Image: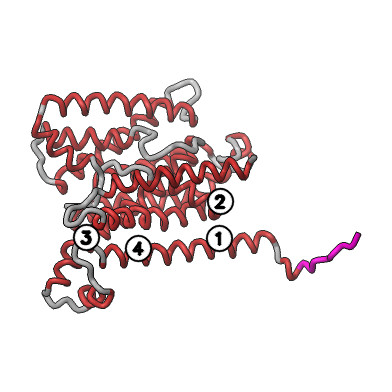
Amino acid sequence: MTTVAVRPERAGPPRRRDARRRLAVALAAALLLVAVLLASLALGSRPLAVGEVWGALTAPDGGQATTIVRELRLPRTVLGLVVGLALALAGVLFQAVTRNPLAEPRILGVSAGASFGVVLAIAVFGVGTLTGYVWFGVAGALLAGLLVFAVANRTRDGASPVTLALVGAALDASLGAIVYALLSIDARTFEEYRFWVVGGLTGRDAGVAGQVLPFVLAGTVLAALVARGLDALALGDDVATGLGHRTALVRLGAGVAGVLLTGAAVAAAGPIAFVGLAVPHLARAMVGADHRWTLLVAGLLGPALLLAADVVGRLVAPPGEVPAGIITALIGAPLLAFLVRRARVVTA
């Protein structure tokens, strides 16, 4: 039997090869995001050439192309970038905190809290504009997240993954019941809420992205700070503690970051499905379980998926539009099924 020796310098250290592969994946994801951003500005019921888009952005002349790009498509593109980033990062954080691969931004009742805040703003305070009830949605999401952590901490097991998931599910059901009760007795609230709850980027002006951007930035920074601790947390609380990590602080930091990101995204664009569930799995399949890389790649793929869904929604039924939340559900379901099937094949 003949053996073939491989020179170590040619094979390269495994860690270095992994880093190069992850960097290549991140660069590919960034290029994909740039392409989708361009498509979001160029495509719609009135397609524009790349030169027209560039001219509208750099040298606006007040023509039709400038109006379409700067007043209609640019605000929703910026909002899609912000919301997609927030949902994808929140999904990574919640799946890590709860150790549940099916966790998504609604797992801690945060989406239900945002819905409750929006309905309360419309039904009780008479707020009739999106820029007005965005603040109520953010406040409702933050209060729901804080309530989940407060209740979980008072249980015998503390804020464990199972406890957080159970308390979040209970709060989601309770707030959902209150929301539907308010909608059933007030037709005007139902009409306003129907526009928001479908989930999408249509009809949102530039001010909406500006309102939620501080919350998204704060959540993103906090997620980056706890990323290394999440790697240790995945090994179990005892191992993480042995490695010098304060598990309760890491879990709280990740939870707060997830609540900030989810509250901002849901308040601005409605409860958009599958971005926070499917994108983290896709990122992990591409770069592995290192949360620093997973957060980076998910933060690039999330906006790309949401904006691609928004573009598809504009093109499938012109001159009308299908909300991005519907398209993400249609795209995300088979994508998630494929990733689950792939995982089963690999582990079999």
Q: Residues within 10 Å of mark 3 (few under 14, many from 20)?
A: many
Residue 257 visible in the shown view: no
Q: Which label lies toward us, 2 or 3?
A: 3
Which secondary structure, mark 4?
helix
Which secondary structure, mark 3?
helix
Instruction: Point out which mark residue 36 bears.
Output: 4
Quadrant (top left, top right, bottom left, bottom right) of the N terminus: bottom right
Q: Identify the mark nearer the N-term, 2 or 3.
A: 3
Which residues make up the magenta segment? 1-8
Q: How crowded is mark 1: few (under 14 residues within 10 Å), some or many (20 or more)?
A: some
In the picture shown, does residue 320 fall above or below 143?
A: below
Labels 4 and 3 touching (C-beta < 8 A): no
Q: How crowded is mark 2: few (under 14 residues within 10 Å), some or many (20 or more)?
A: some
| Residue located beneath label 1 in the image | 22
Q: Which residue is drawn at 49% across and 31% down?
A: 161
Which secondary structure, mark 2?
loop
The prevailing secondary structure element of the residues shown in magenta is loop
Labels 1 and 2 touching (C-beta < 8 A): yes
What whole-number distance in Å separates the C-alpha atoms at marks 2 and 3? 33 Å
What whole-number distance in Å separates the C-alpha atoms at marks 1 and 2? 10 Å
Identified by mark 1, the residue type is Arg
Name the spot of residue 221 as percent of width and height, x first.
40, 53
What whole-number distance in Å separates the C-alpha atoms at marks 4 and 1? 21 Å
Instruction: Point out which mark residue 61 bears.
Output: none
